[in-house]
Image (cartoon, coloured by chain):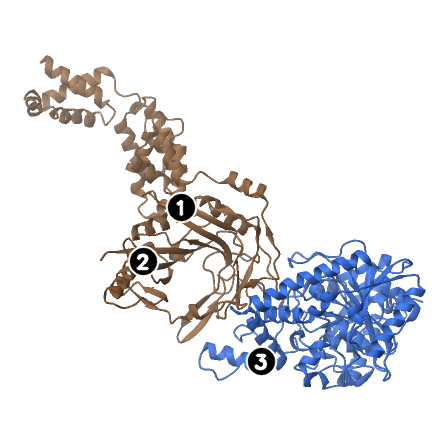
Chain colours: A blue, B brown
Amino acid sequence: MSESKIMQLHESLVKKEFSCRELTEKYIAAIEKDNSTLNAYVTVTPETALGTADKVDAKISAGEEISLLEGIPMTLKDNISTDGIRTTCCSKILEDYTPIYDATVWKILKAQNSVLLGKTNMDEFAMGSSCENSYFGGAKNPHNVGHVAGGSSGGVASAVGGNIAVYGLGSDTGGSIRQPASFCGIVGMKPTYGAVSRFGLIAYASSLDQIGPITTNVEDTAIVYDAISQYDPMDSTSQGRKGAAVCDTLKNDIKGMKIGIAREYLEGIREDVRIAVENAISVYQSLGAEIVYFNMPSLKYALPVYYIIACAEASSNLGRYDGIRYGFKAENYRDVNDMVKKTRSTGFGEEVKRRILLGTYVLSSGYYDAYYKKAQNLRGTIVQAFKKAFQACDVILAPTVPMTAFENGHAVSDPVETYLTDICTVPVNICGLPGVSVPCGFDAKGMPIGMQLIGDSFCEAKILNAAWQYEKTANQFRASDFGAKL
Amino acid sequence: MKYELVAGFETHVELSTNTKIFCSCTTAFGGEPNTHCCPICIGLPGTLPKLNKKVVEYAIRAGLATNCEIAEISKMDRKNYCYPDLPKAYQISQYDKPLCEHGYIALSNGRKIRILRIHIEEDAGKLVHRRGDTLVDYNRGGVPLIEIVTEPDFRSVDEAKEYVEKLQNIMRYIGVSDCKMQEGSMRCDVNISVRPEGSEKLGTRTEIKNMNSITFIAKAMEYEYSRQVDLIESGEKVIQETLRYDDVTNTTSGMRGKEDANDYRYFRDPDLVTITVPRSYVEEIKESLPELPEAKKERYVSELGLPESDAILLTKYRKVAEYYEKASEGTKNPKTAANFIIGQIFRSVETESEKEEFNVSVSAENLNELIMMLDSGKIKMNLAKSTLDKMLETGKKATELISESDMGGLDDSVLNDLCRQAVENNPKAVSDYIAGKEKAVKAMVGFVMKNSRGKADAALAEQKIIEIIKNA
């Protein structure tokens, strides 16, 4: 039987083992039961979901063919615009904002009758690593609700890990797909910059943001990625997938594949995480892959480069939330400037304000050269380092996060320490490369550990191939106690 | 002491592309507020800009027409500032890699106004103040603009006026903008300073923003020149500031330093990719450019032999020049069509905008037909002129207005009779002529013309009348 949950459900639907309505109702019931604990969803859309389910059932009874994703209950991070369904970015400033157009990724999935269960929780404007910066409170880790689901796509990871969605789409600016996937013991991929359209994704940092799948297994990630990696004329930076569907080569042999290890990635990470990654290296050796070690000294600049560039772009991207056209507007103001000031002061959360201030500072005249320009130059240096690395190896293996999921409340108390935990995920965004996080073990408390496979631009097929082979040999996925029982 | 004026221009020209710079909304002027808008041009969260290629093409046209170098690699930047008419809180513009640089426009006094740069950017919306409320209309938001920046090369108000007029004409000629200042599709900011004549050092400058008429520009510059001279003369200092010109009081006043205090935090727009301009593309555009007014004027003088004053009038507006060229095609003398257009047709188009449109009731083809009839001797000049007046009035063709009997002039015996009658009926004119007043013959010619209803050949009639008098 296939490891792919999407394939299994698809076959069951086609064989009429259960109807799409029954499947959807199960998930809706599971959300009703578990969402108050997990806080994964901020908006639930049962009518939309059931409406779509009925359409799929009608097609099946009429004997029509359905696509793999048709009728599969799923979710979208709440920064992906959905026509007629509120899209809040989990910010007070967009609490009541309902888009009038669909993001391209949702347009694609909607056309395939994807069953949208609702919109999921996230750190406000995707800024955070614990999901606790959400205006609606953080999403909880399905393996232990005393821990966070991670961030910023914590809601999607919590929902998928807790099986109150089959899969979901998140966004990854500095690790926001891979880190929560790692924390929740599931799979999440940040595709190559430009592979998936950003049109309709509410921007945090435009040159780093990328939408990608979060699923329970590698094959599902491949299936969803193949569906959404289309060129979009609405996004100038869009290129679409290059080459064949990644599913075509997913299960290829990896004998002789060169797996690179940059020593810097293994420095300063928690012992149990390092051991889990080293065990994965052994698994790859047993599969006949060749392990190549090298140094990438420029990696130490990745974190400051990331925070300077991301904050700079955010300070510009978030300027539009001024209370004039849509969203929250403060009351009791003297004039337009006062209104904008009060709206932004009370509409944005602390972390968002911190990053807007940081970003404004690094772009200011007099500081631009010292920070932003320098960061851009270093960005180029890091890009070159990866280019060189990929001359020596096919994929790079690294931990996803230096530790496992934080306990609730920990991240909020020390923002700078939390920034440091992004060390392993940000280089991929800086260079626009694809990276997939795969579960590779558990810590002593039973919290999942994740490793990531990083590829050269548009080499999703390679990293997913390597990830699938690992999963097949040493599957570290554990179902949680939550969610729909099928 | 005498003071020299030093000025530079920043001119915003709205491009006449059909759609906006980053979305497919119409650029049409007016419209119910906020109806020419979409999620992209009102900057809804998640939307992305997509550069309209026509905008790049039009800007390159403008650059080539003003002798600029066209960049091979260009990019878009964000200019960040917060104002209600700017829905994204940044304007997408170009900072350090403009599309066009280092051009010039030549003035009639031989001086060249150097153009520093031309860049593309998006326009903002418009605030509408009504009954104590301020409303925003985003119809104009995202309309493509080019900003044309000159070096501080102006030394007089007349030069400034000529520059604006020339710029306007060039942009219209190449079809990139209608440059309607009253509708805001061309707006000028002027930087002004003064310095003692002979001095090389630039004085402190002020900037007068957003002027939308050549008259106001001239008045504002004159006012600002005197104000600065007065300040210096009285021992005070000119403060560097941004000014607004009030056309009612004819004065300038400060805009409370809002603009100068801004730090725009320019950075490359990550949503847009590098603009690469292949040389072959620039060549292609160069090929497609029409002959520009300056070159046309020179050709009219040197090749067609028109007086310079006529050439200027005929080349100022592209449609007039096209009309002239069609009307004079194949005619014997290029001056004939010029005279008809300037002498008669121009009377029906009084305003500048009417000349610009040049929607006259006589088509160029019909005028050409009339001139052909004149050239072939079928009709005489007098009849041609009066016919043209009728054509302008009725919109009819010359052939519809001139009957067969009108053509071919008069039978010789009829002309002889009329000349004889003219001499007999004008004894005073005859004696005046004999007494040496040669002009007196004109009265008798007039008699012939009147009684032949313009069909007679005036020159021939004059000859015959003189013969009759001499033979009497």
Identify the residue at horizontal 48%, vertical 50% (top origin).
B101
Identify the residue at horizontal 48%, vertical 68% (top origin).
B85
Q: Residues within 10 Å of mark 3 (few under 14, many from 20)?
A: many
Q: Residues within 10 Å of mark 1 (few under 14, many from 20)?
A: some
Q: Residue B361, located in which quarter of the rendered image?
A: top left
- Give the CA separation, mark 2 to mark 3: 44 Å
* Nearest to viewer (mark 1 / mark 2): 1
Mark 1 chain: B
The x and y percentages for residue B119 are 50, 54
Circle 3 sits on which residue? A347
Q: Is residue A289 visible?
A: yes
The x and y percentages for residue B400 are 36, 31
Q: Is residue A49 left or right of residue B409?
A: right
Identify the residue at horizontal 32%, vertical 49% (top origin).
B159
The amino acid sitting under disc 2 is: Phe
Residue A1, compared with residue B472, is above or below; it is below
The x and y percentages for residue B10 are 41, 56
Circle 2 sits on which residue? B216
The amino acid sitting under disc 1 is: Ile
The amino acid sitting under disc 3 is: Gly
Q: Which type of secondary structure does the marked residue at label 2 adopt?
A: helix
Identify the residue at horizontal 78%, vertical 63% (top origin).
A225
Q: Is residue B426 left or right of residue B368?
A: left
Circle 1 sits on which residue? B105
